[in-house]
Amino acid sequence: MSGHGNAARVDAACLDCGSWSVTADGFCERCGLRQPGADEHAEAHLVVDGRPALGAGISDPGLRRVHNEDAFALAALPHGACGVVCDGVATAPGSREAARAAAQTASAVLLDRIAAGAAPDEATREAAGRAGEAVAALADPGEPGPACTFVSAVVAADRVTIAWLGDSRAYWLSAAGSFPLTTDDSWAVRAVARGELTADEAWTDRRAHMLTGWMGADAGAFEAHLAAFEPDGPGLVLICSDGLWNDLPDAAALASVALGGAGAEAGPLGAARRLVRAALDAGGHDNVTVVVIEFPPPDPTREPGR
């Protein structure tokens, strides 16, 4: 998780006192607590002009899993922000490493390519491809390879660019209307598309969540899906693992939680915390990871503090 430029950075919160003064070696400068490892809970947010804004991410192991096999990356771009969420495939060995490699690789490529002037769709396509290569490289010859799902978002001043593979999802959330931006690579979606089953029949089938697309050495030739969206008003871009949408699949319900009400913690961090809490309150059956990015991003030409 990294920031870009002088006006934005990523901070992590102390899980004991809530201070954002956590050192690079994992100690809180306020209370001295050593922060939990990656198997537990992680929070990060982008800071613009000294205030939490633009984007936030949270990953939590949930209430039923020993390890957190999700990963996320969040970074500020010259004129916006990007995020990546990856979910390690539990049936494959090395899933945690696969998710982390894909998220970190994709985020680094997005930062480098967009800072160099590449168009968001070009940078996104390259980032997804490089992330897949990083996961495939983790496999040992002749052995089952690590695997993960993937979703990324590049949020610019007038456009949102999404890439995905598997069943990690992206949503547009706003008071004016909310809807998914991705379609799962899953057995249920394929069965419905072929006219073999109704949606209700497919999603209640025991095979419903079987993946038909993923990143990994055994994924074969793949190309991540790419989509672009031009919002006509303010809102939030949400990317998440299935630990969230398995319990809250409806976009309107996600928006109701994320946008909150009077007195709710404002900004992307507040939205991310409410979404994770909703998943845990619903049972926390799986690792849950969310990244929330504001649209539109702050105008980089405005004076700081104004």
Image (tube, grey):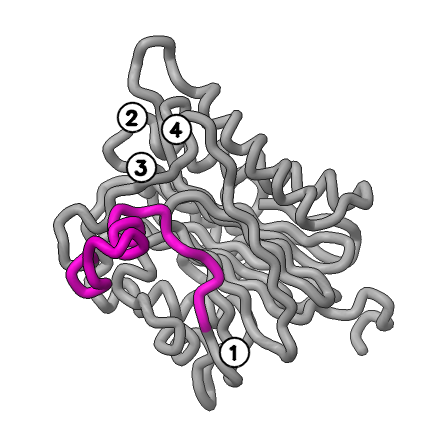
Q: Amino acid at mark 3?
A: Val
- The residue that mark 2 highlights is 93
Residue 61, percent from left and from top: 30, 49
Q: Nearer the viewer, mark 3 or mark 4?
A: 4
The residue under the point 34% across, 27% down is: 94
- The residue that mark 3 highlights is 89
**What range of the chain is rendered magenta?**
179-202
Label 4 neighbourhood size at 10 Å, few (<14), some (14-19), many (20+)? some
Q: Is residue 197 left or right of residue 111?
A: left
Q: Nearer the viewer, mark 2 or mark 4?
A: 4
Residue 10, percent from left and from top: 62, 53
Between the residue at mark 1 and the residue at mark 4, the CA separation in whole angstroms equals: 35 Å
Between the residue at mark 2 and the residue at mark 4, the CA separation in whole angstroms equals: 14 Å
- The residue that mark 4 highlights is 219
Residue 225 in sight: yes
- The C terminus sits in image quarter: bottom right
Q: Quadrant of residue 87?
A: top left
Residue 193, percent from left and from top: 32, 54
Q: Amino acid at mark 2?
A: Pro
Residue 134, percent from left and from top: 51, 26
Label 2 neighbourhood size at 10 Å, few (<14), some (14-19), many (20+)? some
Question: Which of marks 4 and 2 precedes in the sequence?
Answer: 2
